[in-house]
Amino acid sequence: MYDDILPMFRDIGAEPMHYRRGALTVYESDAAFEADQDEWALKRELGVRWHALKPRHVRELEPALAPVFRHGVYLEDWSHIGDPRRLVTLLREHVCVLGGEFVTGVARAIEAPASVVFADGASVRQTHRGGGGRVVRVAGGIDRRSRAAGERARLQRDAAKAGDRAVARGDLRGAQVRRDAARHRLAHRRRDGIPGLDAPANYRRREALLALGQRFLPGVDETDAVNWMGNRPTTPDSLPVIGASPRVASVIYAFGHGHLGLMQCATTAVLIADVLAQSPRVPLTPYSIARFESGS
């Protein structure tokens, strides 16, 4: 992923908000640590770089943690973006510099050869300047009311809930991400605040997260804490939809990345460029929208 996404960060000026400081996974018990060994071994086989930590090394890496953890695992290549909203702004600005134009509206249909029809009846025709014909790339979000033109696949893009509680604390050091493995909770630094959507949200899980944070990070300050909730576009099998439509040649899909959209966006763009150039470097059949057709 880094081979694709790092050049994108450089192009749009997002390098200062990209933190490559690793991640710390912590365990309170020997049993919990041993239970995860098969998973860690598999990750190492797949090229994930990590090393185990003794309790004193965990405290050295993150002194703010409570002294309750018996084991730690440090992932060397983990990174995160401190201001995702600013990143999106930079991407939009870069697209405009390259000659792109943003047209807002709710897309309701795609008509051949490459015209997008909006809910208000307006339409936009996509023109590909490279001589390869007109193409529409569909990168849909969480609105399941949107329809993919010409497809009969029964695809439900669910809006999976994602939430967090932002608290004011500025003395965390060491690894930028801290994960309590047994409870599947993460804590990391953010530079921005993410506003909640209008969709109903149940914040009891966030209250539980805060309680854990207060236990594992003694003295955490919840003054002016902010709850937020967002929606993630997911597919039934948790794989994104990437590649050309099997029914409408001018439609190319790139959506459904769930909570991995930022991580996978640049690589997805590379794969879509391959589709446009008709020179795919990897088979895209597992990601085809055709897998959702009735009987497939």
Image (cartoon, grey):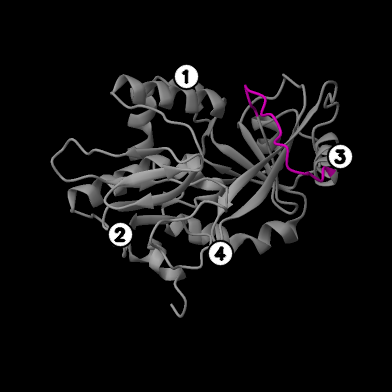
- Circle 1 crowding by C-alpha within 10 Å: few under 14, some 14–19, many from 20: few
User: Residue 53: image x %, image y %?
Assistant: 62, 44
User: Residue 192: image x %, image y %?
Assistant: 63, 23
Q: Could you tell me how far apart the alpha carbons at marks 2 and 1 are, in whole angstroms? A: 41 Å
- Name the kind of residue labelled 1 in the image: Pro
- Name the kind of residue labelled 2 in the image: Val
Identify the mark at residue 291; answer none if there is no mark: none
Q: Could you tell me how far apart the alpha carbons at marks 1 and 4 are, in whole angstroms? A: 36 Å
Q: Could you tell me how far apart the alpha carbons at marks 3 and 4 are, in whole angstroms? A: 32 Å
Q: Secondary structure at mark 3?
A: helix
Task: Identify the magenta region.
Answer: 189-203
Q: Could you tell me how far apart the alpha carbons at marks 3 and 1 are, in whole angstroms? A: 32 Å
Location of residue 290 by image quarter:
bottom left
- Circle 3 crowding by C-alpha within 10 Å: few under 14, some 14–19, many from 20: few
Q: Secondary structure at mark 4?
A: loop
Say whether marks 3 and 1 touch (CB < 8 Å): no
Say whether marks 2 and 1 touch (CB < 8 Å): no
Give whichever of 227, 292 is nearer the camera.
292
Tag 4 residue? 236
Decide if residue 45 is in sight here.
yes
Q: Earlier in the sequence, mark 2 or mark 3?
A: 3
Q: Quadrant of the C terminus?
A: bottom left
Q: Residue at x 33, y 45 (%)?
A: 115
Q: Could you tell me how far apart the alpha carbons at marks 2 and 3 are, in whole angstroms? A: 51 Å
| Residue furthest out toward the left | 131
User: Residue 175: image x %, image y %?
Assistant: 60, 32
Tag 2 residue? 248
| Residue furthest out toward the bottom | 295
Tag 3 residue? 211
